[in-house]
Image (tube, helix red, strand yellow):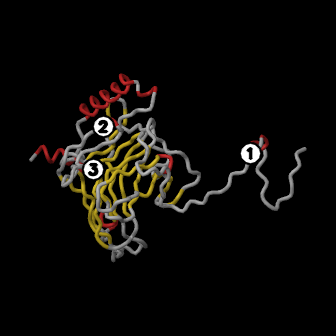
Amino acid sequence: MVAPTLARLAGGRPSFLRRSVEELRRQAGIAVRMEGLHSPQKPFPLMKFDEPQTPERCKIMSDQTNFGGYSRATLTHVPGAKHIDNEGGLGRIGGGERVGEEPAHAVFSGSISTDLPTNRSDIQRSGFAAWRTRDRGWWMFGKLLWDIDPYAYLALRIKSDGRKYFINIQTESIVPTDIHQHLLPSYTPGKWETVTIPFSAFVRTNYGVVVEPQREMLRQKIRSVGIGLTDRVPGPFELCIADIYATNRAPEHGREREDTGFDLEVEEEEEHGMLDEIAPRQKKGEPERILI
């Protein structure tokens, strides 16, 4: 009973020594393969739900846990086929594609309720559920973060129910509440599929609101990755996730740009002159400025 309890308290994370050894081994492998000199061909796993304890490495959130609402959410492991890293040397994670077979995965499920808690008059909106990976802890050289800068895409092996989920990526940025988000696409709801999204397509938000300016994601310092459901449609939901990984394999559907899930107004950029650095840009209808 002691070992499982300690594992739960640690959030399913390995020990400090083991984390340090694994990170040193990973970085040594990068140096040996000279991945810094060219684009890596193998996928870089961020989360693999291939073992029973992997859901413990994730934090579950809902309006019920946050402020006493009525939405419920769980993340449970389902055993299945073994995951195959870099299947066929194609920069993807596979396994479980045969007929009648499923990969080992986690099920993110529950129900959404928009009912407001009766004892919280300050709450005006309700109806969300989400999960994210827990902080990975520390190793001998500081905080453990993912460096996915050599990769262009985020890939997920999922089986969706067709609801409007968002992928959330949090970085070690100056503003800790900033999150980069993108709508989770699904082409074949009810069936297993691999969806791929360019990191450049993610939208910077803060508490769900688009933030300007849209700075590029700090991919050298990824803190967590997760998925949320915020469509506020009452009723049950179920999303199966096998893997989340970074890759340089282009999208299988041939779409470099997906619907981000946000209404972004694209303004035409005006050409900048040399004097823009020392003189503010003239507004429409404003009389012309003359430099003396």
Q: Mark 2 is on which residue type?
A: Gly
Image quarter in which the C terminus is found:
top right
Q: Secondary structure at mark 1?
A: loop
Which mark is in front, 3 or 2? 2
Residue 11 percent coordinates (x, y)? 24, 47
Q: Which residue is mark 1?
A: 272
Q: Which residue is mark 3?
A: 242
Is label 2 in contact with label 1 (beta carbons under 8 Å)? no
Which residue occupies the foreground of this view, 133 or 82? 82
* Rendered residue at 35%/35% (across/down): 42
Ranked by sequence position, the earlier of labels 3 and 1 is: 3
* Rendered residue at 15%/48% (across/down): 5
Quadrant assignment, res 161: bottom left
Ranked by sequence position, the earlier of labels 2 and 1 is: 2
Distance between the Cα atoms at labels 3 and 1?
47 Å
Residue 105 percent coordinates (x, y)? 23, 51
Which residue occupies the foreground of this view, 75 or 260? 260
* Rendered residue at 37%/33% (across/down): 142
Relative side of 262 to 252, left or right? right
Residue 41 percent coordinates (x, y)? 38, 34
Residue found at the far right of this picture: 292
Q: Secondary structure at mark 3?
A: strand
Q: Residues within 10 Å of mark 1 (few under 14, many from 20)?
A: few
Q: Which residue is mark 2?
A: 88
Distance between the Cα atoms at labels 3 and 2?
18 Å
Relative side of 108 to 177, left or right? left
Residue 71 circle label: none
Is label 3 in contact with label 1 (beta carbons under 8 Å)? no
Q: Residues within 10 Å of mark 2 (few under 14, many from 20)?
A: few
